[in-house]
Amino acid sequence: MEVKNYLLDYNNLFIIQDTNMFSFSLDSVLLANFATINKACNKILDIGTGNAPIPLMLSTKTDSKIVGVEIQKEVSDLAKKSVEINSLENQIKIVNEDINDFYLKCESDSFDVITCNPPYFKDCIINNSLYKTVARHENFLTLNKICKISKKVLKNKGNLVLVHRPERFVEIIDEMRKNNIEPKRVRFVYPKIGKEANILLIEGKKNGRPGLKILDPLYVHSDDGSYTFEVEKFFKGEKNDSE
Amino acid sequence: MEVKNYLLDYNNLFIIQDTNMFSFSLDSVLLANFATINKACNKILDIGTGNAPIPLMLSTKTDSKIVGVEIQKEVSDLAKKSVEINSLENQIKIVNEDINDFYLKCESDSFDVITCNPPYFKDCIINNSLYKTVARHENFLTLNKICKISKKVLKNKGNLVLVHRPERFVEIIDEMRKNNIEPKRVRFVYPKIGKEANILLIEGKKNGRPGLKILDPLYVHSDDGSYTFEVEKFFKGEKNDSE
């Protein structure tokens, strides 16, 4: 494995990544900004944390402890390095383990929030890069499993927050509800004005009451191709209006 | 009953309404514009047709036969008058009957499209106006029943098109899927930029394959409070771009 490290600046935070594996992505930035993190929150789980962009970004908006679980050794090593560089070892713990094994050892009802930027594709194609295969395809982590894990380890009224693809929205709702997680907040993300949504942000509450809010649409690009003002703010780690 | 008739101009169409009952609404306009009506379509059912705004508006974009069913006698009489004034008796048939009885007499798999602007509220409150109670509350027509009826009388691959409230989106998806209607197209309608969606347009296909499209957002009002250009076009009955 040829490791190339990149340092990215996000709210004075450094995130190491290797483009041979996968990169700090728009999806993770959107998820970290979308998630509702209350002041009382004291334990967050990030499933399939990769090089830990979500725990790192969340650390700028909460003092909660954050556990990031990553199945791939080399990727979790990068995550650990980023945590060290930012001196966040007291807040963020990276675990190199299959979440399907890890959660069995977790106490029930122990996390306030679970975040996940999961594999989007249902099929089990093997890419040239094993790293990318694991991150993108549901070989090791299905939507069903994410919801089952959340049902077990989320506290009562705790939130599961996902970034996903709109075409799987119906299935996400099904899986959440089968596991007593009620979809409560959704934000659709559009590449630009006039296009269909291509990213879905969704937050569900364990044992929540029915009633869904569809937040205002988020546009990623302006007509000239540049990031919109709102997304640019997200990338810089600036607080958004809803916080 | 004090009947006041209003004539509204929509693409050279006259629609009679009585504000004591309920009025030709934005919801119906949005639904009529949103519905996919193929050229091969030859039979449409509008459930709870009221004073028939949806059949009347659809008649401007299809030659298909349209049946509008309305439980309330006085309201269906207004609908019949509008059909006559517009000389559309050959295309639109208004039936004064409870849809729960009517559909039992329909052939299975006989409609290409079902449209419905249903009661939005789950509870069974009785308003001062019986007309408004029936139109707004699920006393006589539940979401579950609409989907059951559609399962029976829609052709294979026929579409059910609803306008509803976003907070009931999850339930709509549940009910559709329980009845083999797969949600395929959704458009959220926002009162203005920066606000949550307050209207949901959804189209599901009987025995359709999973895969949902979230269309571009529709804004109703501009910052100055006037209708947006797109909604203004809808009110005038002008064709939209997707047709």
Image (tube, coloured by chain):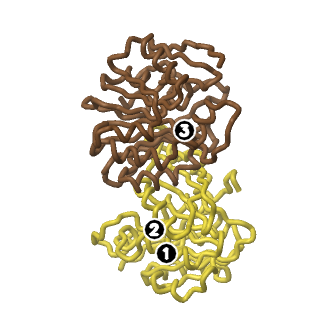
Chain colours: A brown, B yellow
Query: In the figure, residue B151 lies in which quadrant?
Result: bottom right
Q: Name the amino acid type tagged 3.
A: Val
Circle 3 packing at 10 Å, graded few (<14), some (14-19), many (20+), is many
Q: Name the amino acid type tagged 2.
A: Pro
Q: Please give the name of the residue rendered at 51% of the width and 74% of the height, measured from the top-left corner.
A: B47
Viewer-proximal residue among A103 and A175 = A103
Residue to which mark 1 is pinned: B148
Viewer-proximal residue among A145 and B196 = A145
Residue to which mark 2 is pinned: B118
Asked if residue B63 lies left or right of residue A33, the reply is right
Question: Which label number is shown at residue B40?
Answer: none
Circle 2 packing at 10 Å, graded few (<14), some (14-19), many (20+), is many
Q: Position of residue A129 (x, y in %)?
A: 67, 30
In this view, the residue farthest toward the left is: A40
Q: Are marks 2 and 1 on the same chain?
A: yes
Marks 2/3 in contact by CB < 8 Å: the verdict is no
Asked if residue B200 lies left or right of residue B233, the reply is left
**In this rendering, is residue B50 above or below A62?**
below
Q: Name the amino acid type tagged 1.
A: Lys
Disc 2 on helix, strand or loop?
loop
Residue to which mark 3 is pinned: A189
Disc 3 on helix, strand or loop?
strand
Question: Is residue A82 at least partly visible in the picture?
Answer: yes
Circle 1 packing at 10 Å, graded few (<14), some (14-19), many (20+), is some
Q: Please give the name of the residue rendered at 63% of the width and 68% of the height, measured from the top-left corner.
A: B58
In this view, the residue farthest toward the bottom is: B105
